[in-house]
Protein backbone atom coordinates (compact mmCIF):
# COMPACT_ATOMS: atom_id res chain seq x y z
CA UNK A 1 0.00 0.00 0.00
CA UNK A 2 1.16 3.53 -0.76
CA UNK A 3 1.38 6.38 1.73
CA UNK A 4 -1.82 7.88 0.33
CA UNK A 5 -3.71 4.63 0.82
CA UNK A 6 -2.48 4.20 4.40
CA UNK A 7 -3.40 7.79 5.20
CA UNK A 8 -6.86 7.30 3.74
CA UNK A 9 -7.43 4.13 5.79
CA UNK A 10 -6.15 5.72 9.01
CA UNK A 11 -8.19 8.86 8.48
CA UNK A 12 -11.35 6.89 7.65
CA UNK A 13 -11.09 4.84 10.86
CA UNK A 14 -10.41 7.95 12.96
CA UNK A 15 -13.24 9.97 11.41
CA UNK A 16 -15.70 7.08 11.71
CA UNK A 17 -14.84 6.54 15.39
CA UNK A 18 -15.27 10.26 16.10
CA UNK A 19 -18.56 10.35 14.21
CA UNK A 20 -19.94 7.37 16.13
CA UNK A 21 -18.74 8.66 19.50
CA UNK A 22 -20.28 12.07 18.88
CA UNK A 23 -23.59 10.56 17.77
CA UNK A 24 -24.05 8.06 20.61
CA UNK A 25 -25.67 10.19 23.34
CA UNK A 26 -27.82 12.33 20.97
CA UNK A 27 -28.86 9.17 19.12
CA UNK A 28 -30.02 7.41 22.28
CA UNK A 29 -31.85 10.54 23.45
CA UNK A 30 -33.68 11.05 20.15
CA UNK A 31 -34.51 7.34 19.90
CA UNK A 32 -35.88 7.40 23.45
CA UNK A 33 -38.07 10.41 22.71
CA UNK A 34 -39.44 8.87 19.51
CA UNK A 35 -40.07 5.49 21.13
CA UNK A 36 -41.59 6.55 24.45
CA UNK A 37 -43.41 9.84 23.92
CA UNK A 38 -46.32 11.15 21.87
CA UNK A 39 -46.26 14.87 21.12
CA UNK A 40 -47.16 17.42 18.49
CA UNK A 41 -44.46 17.48 15.82
CA UNK A 42 -43.27 13.92 16.42
CA UNK A 43 -43.70 13.05 12.75
CA UNK A 44 -41.71 16.14 11.80
CA UNK A 45 -38.86 15.18 14.16
CA UNK A 46 -38.92 11.63 12.80
CA UNK A 47 -38.77 12.97 9.26
CA UNK A 48 -35.88 15.30 10.03
CA UNK A 49 -33.92 12.47 11.64
CA UNK A 50 -34.35 10.24 8.60
CA UNK A 51 -33.91 12.99 6.00
CA UNK A 52 -30.24 12.10 5.28
CA UNK A 53 -31.41 8.66 4.14
CA UNK A 54 -33.55 10.07 1.33
CA UNK A 55 -31.77 13.29 0.35
CA UNK A 56 -28.79 13.16 -2.02
CA UNK A 57 -25.61 13.26 0.12
CA UNK A 58 -24.42 16.27 -1.90
CA UNK A 59 -27.42 18.22 -0.61
CA UNK A 60 -26.50 17.39 2.99
CA UNK A 61 -22.91 18.42 2.33
CA UNK A 62 -23.99 21.72 0.82
CA UNK A 63 -26.30 22.45 3.75
CA UNK A 64 -23.44 21.71 6.14
CA UNK A 65 -21.24 24.07 4.15
CA UNK A 66 -23.87 26.81 4.40
CA UNK A 67 -24.19 26.30 8.16
CA UNK A 68 -20.65 25.44 9.23
CA UNK A 69 -18.52 27.11 6.57
CA UNK A 70 -16.36 30.01 7.75
CA UNK A 71 -19.08 32.39 6.55
CA UNK A 72 -21.96 30.22 7.69
CA UNK A 73 -24.12 31.04 10.69
CA UNK A 74 -22.68 28.38 12.99
CA UNK A 75 -19.25 28.25 11.37
CA UNK A 76 -18.62 31.97 11.73
CA UNK A 77 -19.72 31.88 15.37
CA UNK A 78 -17.50 28.90 16.21
CA UNK A 79 -14.53 30.52 14.50
CA UNK A 80 -15.03 33.87 16.20
CA UNK A 81 -15.87 32.53 19.66
CA UNK A 82 -13.66 29.45 20.00
CA UNK A 83 -11.29 29.71 17.05
CA UNK A 84 -12.64 26.41 15.70
CA UNK A 85 -12.90 25.85 11.97
CA UNK A 86 -14.90 22.84 10.83
CA UNK A 87 -15.03 23.13 7.04
CA UNK A 88 -12.23 21.62 4.96
CA UNK A 89 -10.62 19.57 7.74
CA UNK A 90 -11.12 16.21 9.48
CA UNK A 91 -13.58 17.65 11.99
CA UNK A 92 -15.90 18.59 9.15
CA UNK A 93 -15.51 15.12 7.65
CA UNK A 94 -16.48 13.61 11.02
CA UNK A 95 -19.53 15.89 11.19
CA UNK A 96 -20.62 14.93 7.68
CA UNK A 97 -20.19 11.23 8.46
CA UNK A 98 -22.11 11.61 11.74
CA UNK A 99 -25.03 13.35 10.05
CA UNK A 100 -25.29 10.73 7.33
CA UNK A 101 -25.02 7.80 9.77
CA UNK A 102 -27.26 9.27 12.50
CA UNK A 103 -30.55 7.85 11.14
CA UNK A 104 -29.18 4.30 11.23
CA UNK A 105 -28.14 4.68 14.86
CA UNK A 106 -31.47 6.19 15.90
CA UNK A 107 -33.50 3.58 14.04
CA UNK A 108 -31.64 0.62 15.56
CA UNK A 109 -31.82 2.04 19.09
CA UNK A 110 -35.49 3.02 18.71
CA UNK A 111 -36.48 -0.48 17.62
CA UNK A 112 -34.59 -1.88 20.58
CA UNK A 113 -36.33 0.48 23.02
CA UNK A 114 -39.73 -0.37 21.58
CA UNK A 115 -38.92 -4.03 22.20
CA UNK A 116 -38.45 -3.41 25.93
CA UNK A 117 -41.69 -4.18 27.77
CA UNK A 118 -42.97 -1.20 29.70
CA UNK A 119 -44.49 -3.63 32.20
CA UNK A 120 -40.97 -4.50 33.36
CA UNK A 121 -40.20 -0.81 33.84
CA UNK A 122 -43.50 -0.32 35.70
CA UNK A 123 -42.69 -3.25 37.98
CA UNK A 124 -39.33 -1.70 38.83
CA UNK A 125 -41.05 1.59 39.68
CA UNK A 126 -43.53 -0.13 41.99
CA UNK A 127 -40.55 -1.56 43.88
CA UNK A 128 -39.34 1.97 44.57
CA UNK A 129 -36.88 2.58 41.74
CA UNK A 130 -36.74 6.13 40.42
CA UNK A 131 -36.80 7.01 36.70
CA UNK A 132 -32.99 7.21 36.43
CA UNK A 133 -32.48 3.89 38.21
CA UNK A 134 -35.13 2.20 36.06
CA UNK A 135 -33.41 3.44 32.92
CA UNK A 136 -29.86 2.45 33.90
CA UNK A 137 -30.64 -0.88 35.59
CA UNK A 138 -33.58 -2.15 33.52
CA UNK A 139 -34.08 -0.36 30.21
CA UNK A 140 -30.47 0.28 29.20
CA UNK A 141 -29.26 -3.34 29.59
CA UNK A 142 -32.24 -4.62 27.61
CA UNK A 143 -31.70 -2.13 24.78
CA UNK A 144 -27.93 -2.60 24.61
CA UNK A 145 -28.03 -5.07 21.67
CA UNK A 146 -29.79 -2.37 19.64
CA UNK A 147 -27.20 0.20 20.68
CA UNK A 148 -24.40 -2.12 19.59
CA UNK A 149 -26.10 -2.75 16.26
CA UNK A 150 -26.69 0.97 15.73
CA UNK A 151 -23.09 1.84 16.55
CA UNK A 152 -21.64 -0.73 14.18
CA UNK A 153 -24.03 0.18 11.37
CA UNK A 154 -23.31 3.89 11.76
CA UNK A 155 -19.57 3.11 11.84
CA UNK A 156 -19.84 1.17 8.59
CA UNK A 157 -21.92 3.97 7.04
CA UNK A 158 -19.34 6.54 8.13
CA UNK A 159 -16.56 4.52 6.50
CA UNK A 160 -18.43 4.62 3.19
CA UNK A 161 -19.50 8.28 3.26
CA UNK A 162 -18.58 10.15 0.05
CA UNK A 163 -21.01 12.77 -1.29
CA UNK A 164 -21.52 14.92 1.81
CA UNK A 165 -17.83 14.71 2.69
CA UNK A 166 -16.43 15.82 -0.64
CA UNK A 167 -18.98 18.65 -0.85
CA UNK A 168 -18.40 19.93 2.67
CA UNK A 169 -14.66 19.40 3.22
CA UNK A 170 -13.31 18.70 -0.27
CA UNK A 171 -10.75 15.98 -1.09
CA UNK A 172 -7.52 16.96 0.67
CA UNK A 173 -4.93 14.21 1.06
CA UNK A 174 -3.99 13.61 4.67
CA UNK A 175 -6.75 15.88 5.99
CA UNK A 176 -10.12 14.94 4.50
CA UNK A 177 -9.32 12.20 1.97
CA UNK A 178 -11.07 9.14 3.35
CA UNK A 179 -11.20 5.71 1.71
CA UNK A 180 -14.05 6.52 -0.73
CA UNK A 181 -12.42 9.81 -1.71
CA UNK A 182 -9.03 8.15 -2.21
CA UNK A 183 -10.70 5.44 -4.29
CA UNK A 184 -12.38 8.09 -6.42
CA UNK A 185 -9.06 9.90 -6.87
CA UNK A 186 -7.32 6.72 -7.99
CA UNK A 187 -10.04 5.88 -10.51
CA UNK A 188 -9.49 9.31 -12.07
CA UNK A 189 -5.69 8.95 -12.21
CA UNK A 190 -3.76 7.14 -14.95
CA UNK A 191 -2.27 3.92 -13.59
CA UNK A 192 -4.36 4.04 -10.43
CA UNK A 193 -6.29 0.85 -11.12
CA UNK A 194 -4.24 -1.36 -8.78
CA UNK A 195 -4.53 1.10 -5.92
CA UNK A 196 -8.26 1.46 -6.52
CA UNK A 197 -8.70 -2.31 -6.38
CA UNK A 198 -6.76 -2.48 -3.10
CA UNK A 199 -8.89 0.24 -1.52
CA UNK A 200 -12.05 -1.41 -2.82
CA UNK A 201 -11.07 -4.70 -1.17
CA UNK A 202 -10.14 -2.91 2.06
CA UNK A 203 -13.48 -1.09 2.12
CA UNK A 204 -15.39 -4.34 1.66
CA UNK A 205 -13.36 -6.10 4.37
CA UNK A 206 -13.83 -3.26 6.88
CA UNK A 207 -17.57 -3.01 6.23
CA UNK A 208 -18.14 -6.78 6.37
CA UNK A 209 -16.05 -7.06 9.53
CA UNK A 210 -18.14 -4.36 11.18
CA UNK A 211 -21.39 -6.13 10.27
CA UNK A 212 -20.12 -9.51 11.48
CA UNK A 213 -18.88 -8.03 14.76
CA UNK A 214 -22.24 -6.33 15.22
CA UNK A 215 -24.12 -9.60 14.77
CA UNK A 216 -21.84 -11.56 17.08
CA UNK A 217 -21.86 -8.92 19.83
CA UNK A 218 -25.63 -8.55 19.71
CA UNK A 219 -26.14 -12.31 19.96
CA UNK A 220 -23.68 -12.69 22.83
CA UNK A 221 -25.16 -9.80 24.78
CA UNK A 222 -28.70 -11.06 24.21
CA UNK A 223 -27.68 -14.52 25.42
CA UNK A 224 -26.01 -12.95 28.47
CA UNK A 225 -29.17 -10.98 29.35
CA UNK A 226 -31.39 -14.03 28.99
CA UNK A 227 -28.95 -16.22 30.93
Image (tube, rainbow, N blue to C red):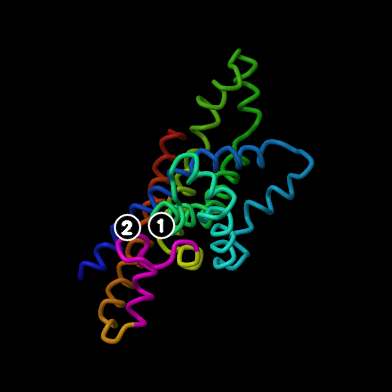
Nearest the viewer among 146 and 29 is 29
Front label number (2 vs 1): 2
Residue 50's place in the image compared with 173, above or below, is above
Within 10 Å of the Cα at label 2, are there few (<14), some (14-19), or many (20+) other Cα atoms? Answer: many
| Quadrant housing residue 188 | bottom left
Question: Is residue 146 shown left or right of residue 181?
Answer: right
Tell me the quarter of the image containing the N terminus.
Answer: bottom left
**Residue 5 position in % (x across, y down):** 26, 68
Which stretch did the figure color magenta? 168-188
Total number of numbered discs in the rendering: 2
| Crowding at mark 1 (Cα within 10 Å: few <14, some 14-19, many 20+) | some
Q: Depth check: 111 or 95 in front?
A: 95
Residue placed at 51% from the left, 26% from the top?
Answer: 136
Please tell me the numbered disc located at residue 11: 2
State the image coordinates of residue 165 (x, y, percent, origin top left): 46, 63
Number of the label disc, if any, that sits on residue 64: none
Check the picture and name the quadrant holding the C terminus.
top left
Residue at x 54% of width, y 51% of height: 102
Numbered label attached to residue 211: 1
Q: Relative to 32, is 171 above or below?
A: below
Res 119 → quadrant: top right
Amino acid sequence: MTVMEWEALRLSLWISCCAVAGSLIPGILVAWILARFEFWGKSLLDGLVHLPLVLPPVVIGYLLLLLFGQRGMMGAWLLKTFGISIAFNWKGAALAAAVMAFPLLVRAVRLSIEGVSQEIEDAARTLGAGPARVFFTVTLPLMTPGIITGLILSFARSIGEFGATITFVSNIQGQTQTLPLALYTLTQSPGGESGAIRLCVISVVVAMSALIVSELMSKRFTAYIRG
